[in-house]
Image (cartoon, coloured by chain):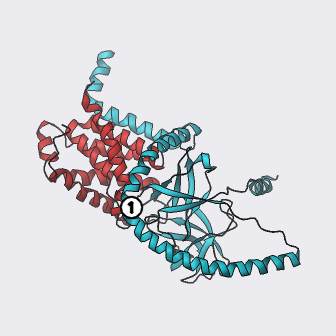
Chain colours: A red, B cyan
Amino acid sequence: MKLKYFIPLLVFIPVVLIQLTVIPLISIQEVVPNLLLITVVYFSISNGQIFGTVTGASYGLLFDFISGNLVGSNMLSKSLAGFIAGYFSGETRREKYLYTYSFTLVVLISALIDAMIISFFSVIDFNTNFLQALFNHALLPSIYTSIVSILVVVIPYKRAFD
Amino acid sequence: MFKLFSNVWNQFREYLVLVSLVIISLSLLTQNNNPQVQKVRALAFGSFATVTSVFYDLFNITQLKNENKVLRRLNAEMMLQLSMLREYGILNRELKGMLGFKDTTSLPIIPATIVSKSISITQNTITINVGNKEGIKPGMPVLSYRGFVGIIQTCSDNFSIARTLKNVDLKLTVKNEKKRLNGIMKWDGEKLVIVDVPRTYDFDIGDRIVTSEISSIIPVPIPVGIVSKIEEDKTGLLNLVHIKPFEEVLSAENVFILMMVENREKNNLELNFYNRR
């Protein structure tokens, strides 16, 4: 069995620890960056679409179980986010999207998909202004997540999991 | 046949994997109240919370100093209030005795520490370091010295997850403490609001909001927040009352659990009434 299949599981524990303990300290009006999503996007671009989709689903499911969220909601959203990020994978695209600032753009797109699906399960009702809900619940967290994802490009550990 | 499947798999495998995972997640979404799923969840977060609690302490040592300062001041204020309340208590007992009222029971609370917070705009939850072993059960209210924090959702042996006020799945019956008007309060993803309030209801900015005794979950009044804004809803027929909570979940570190679950006797009585043919 290749080691690369176990790396996401090993990475999951420290990432989710930081997400649940440190990240709340840097929240702005309940808007927090989503480190799990950044990790999913990273694995999706570096290892391909199927790998990203399965990693997203596993991360989402585990996160649902340990965080008390609706079981299945993060699994669904992160599977799709991983799938979308997978479109930026491939021999030629990998270098372009993983090691440059384009990575933040891919994170932004995937985070938007992720946040919109989560919002759909949480806040949409007849009184909600859809555009405003989209802005508050999807766009702001996605922008924050993509800003934080700059660290992946800047910090020189990027080839460690390849 | 095999070749056909093989061709289909080779051409559409990404989509097939995605569709399978979407189907699995959708079916899981419908199974959230399944006891098996609850059991797996309790096991998963119970194991993980043990690790999180150690990690969380490391990052909160710096905050403890400030919190101690606030608590010392609060302690002094409470001491003054306590001496006043003692006076009232003695007087109250005497008056109740004179009127022949039954004595009220004291409310058992147990302290707990928050070991992790899952912060999102819509589904805030906290994990606390008490569980089944301490007698915690789903439905018990979580509060701090400032006011209401949330409700226990799931328990493992040593840890519990609570939905906080800023969770769209938590809907609470509250009342205006002064005007005695009830309403349903919920987090709409942006603000805490009492919804569908008739425009004839006399809510004012600054009114204190407490949990209502109508609620079968929290039968004692716990402070929730104050009215910060009143606006018309989209229909123009009802009001939305904005609430500023007393307790900000983000800054909360230590909480208490009120060892009280919904009153089954009362619920059964009400259900029997509604089910009467």
User: Is A81 drawn above or below residue B178 in the view shown?
Assistant: above
Horizontal side, residue B4 vs residue B183: left or right = left
User: Is A129 drawn above or below residue A146 in the view shown?
Assistant: below
Q: Nearer the viewer, residue B116 or B111?
A: B111
On the image, numbered disc 1 is attached to which residue?
A: B61
Quarter containing the N terminus of chain A = top left
Residue drawn at 62 percent across, 80 percent down? B81
Horizontal side, residue B102 vs residue B156: left or right = right
Q: Residue B8 placed where, x, y %?
A: 29, 25
Identified by mark 1, the residue type is: Ile
Quarter containing the C terminus of chain A = top left
Q: Nearer the viewer, residue B182 or B248?
A: B248
Q: Which chain does the numbered disc 1 sit on?
A: B
Residue drawn at 39 percent across, 36 percent down? B21
Horizontal side, residue B62 vs residue B157: left or right = left
Asked if residue A75 shows in the view, the reply is no
Residue drawn at 46 percent across, 47 percent down? B49
| Marker count (numbered) | 1
In the structure shown, which secondary structural element does the residue marked by tag 1 occupy? helix
Residue drawn at 69 percent across, 56 percent down? B262
Image quadrant of residue B16?
top left
Q: Residue B146 placed where, x, y %?
A: 54, 71
Q: Nearer the viewer, residue A30 or B241?
A: A30
